[in-house]
Amino acid sequence: MSFSLPDFRRKWSYRGNMSAGAAMVTAALGLLVLADRVEARNYAAPLDIFGLGTPRPRASTHSARMPLRIPLPKPRPEDAPKATDEAAPEADGKPSPDKPSPDKPGKPAEAAPPPEKQLSACRLALTEEIAVAPSIPDIRGPGACGGEDLVRLEAIVLPDKRKVAVKPAAILRCTMASAIANWVRTDMVPLAASLGSTITDLDNFDSFECRGRNRIVGAMLSEHGKANALDVRALKLANGQSIGLTDRTMSRDVRERVLHSVCSRFSTVLGPGSDWYHEDHIHLDLAQRRNDYRICQWNVWDPLPQVAPLLPAERPEEAPPREVAAKSEGTKEGAKDEPKDGADDQESAKPAAPADKPAANSSKSKSTTKKRR
């Protein structure tokens, strides 16, 4: 079978025209379907994954020409609060101070203040009726130095409203300051009363100091570095006396009473006999140890023996001046010598002894003169 283009045109000319027209119609329908699908994808259903959903019907020409009805807001109720005056500057053309203007950059919002720190139970109990101890900020020092809930102990208020000044003021934890105040108020006030006076000052030798134990470099952190210790040297009285805690001239009974009181209140007590670092003061702290272990090392030495003074005693103020004393002594000696001179005159007035007894008279005169001397 032979095939040629002229034969094909002659045989299939009509059919070819029909197929070409059908192709054009098919292409036009395809374009219409494609346009509808594109519009349908713009308004796809929520679950239409492949974009095959039915498109929304187009609005009619009559509905497109009708104006849209916008709902108006409801009227303001009469009981509603009145509008503030913040919008007044904006109405006048001036920006509100709270809202930044578009020309000028706005100020950064101020940071909210930190919440106030809640007071501890110790701080609430340590009132002005017990001690003058204002709170101070927490200390964060090097090597775990410092602490929280700190106070500056300036004075201790006694039950009769008198104050015992702490010189200098001690920086301590609230618990340590409360223990010192209770010790002075409860134990030391009766002790001073037994001596016939009252306490006026507490001699603070050392309180907070960021250091190792006994000020040795590299040693374990001292309780002083934690603001949990106080070194006391003496308690001064109103009559001018002083209760020296390590003074050997002080009564042994008084020092032993102080020893028993501090060892019952504090977890650590170091004094003379513990080491040579605490020979002139007493170390007190509230260190926490396992099983509530306590340390009380303080030897109350016997008083020093009284030794006779090497220098002469001072001349009393009521003694007379030395010149007057010398004159009075001279007059007394002159008075004593006068009768002696009179006796010599009497002896010279006596008659002379006979010449035959010169030896005997001479011996008697010698004896009389010896007695007179």
Image: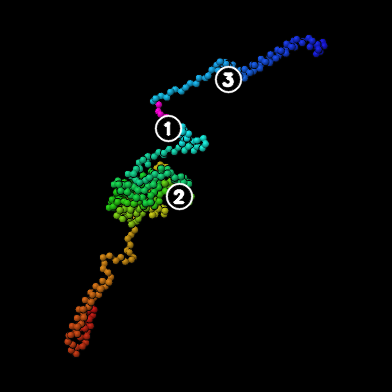
In screen coordinates, is 241 left or right of 95?
left
Q: Is residue 348 above or below residue 104?
A: below
Which callout, 3 or 1, points to the residue nearer the camera? 1
Q: What percent of the width, then of the height, locates residue 108?
A: 49, 38
Q: How many numbered tags mark residues here?
A: 3
Q: Quarter holding the N terminus?
A: top right
Q: What percent of the width, then of the height, locates residue 7?
A: 81, 11
As measured in the structure, the alpha-carbon distance from the residue carrying label 3 to the one carrying label 1 is 46 Å
Residue 211: numbered disc: 2
Tell me the kind of residue under disc 1. Asp
> Residue at 24% of width from left, 78% of height from top?
373
Residue bearing the label numbered 3:
43
> Residue at 48% of width from left, 21% of height from top?
71
- The image's colour scheme reads rainbow
Residue bearing the label numbered 1:
85
In front here: 116 or 109? 109
Sooner in the amino-acid sequence: mark 3 or mark 2: 3
Sooner in the amino-acid sequence: mark 1 or mark 2: 1
As measured in the structure, the alpha-carbon distance from the residue carrying label 1 to the one carrying label 2 is 61 Å
Q: What percent of the width, then of the height, locates residue 6?
A: 81, 12
> Residue at 39% of width from left, 25% of height from top?
78
Residue 339 location, quadrant: bottom left
In front here: 281 or 321? 321
As measured in the structure, the alpha-carbon distance from the residue carrying label 3 to the one carrying label 2 is 78 Å
Tell me the kind of residue under disc 2. Arg
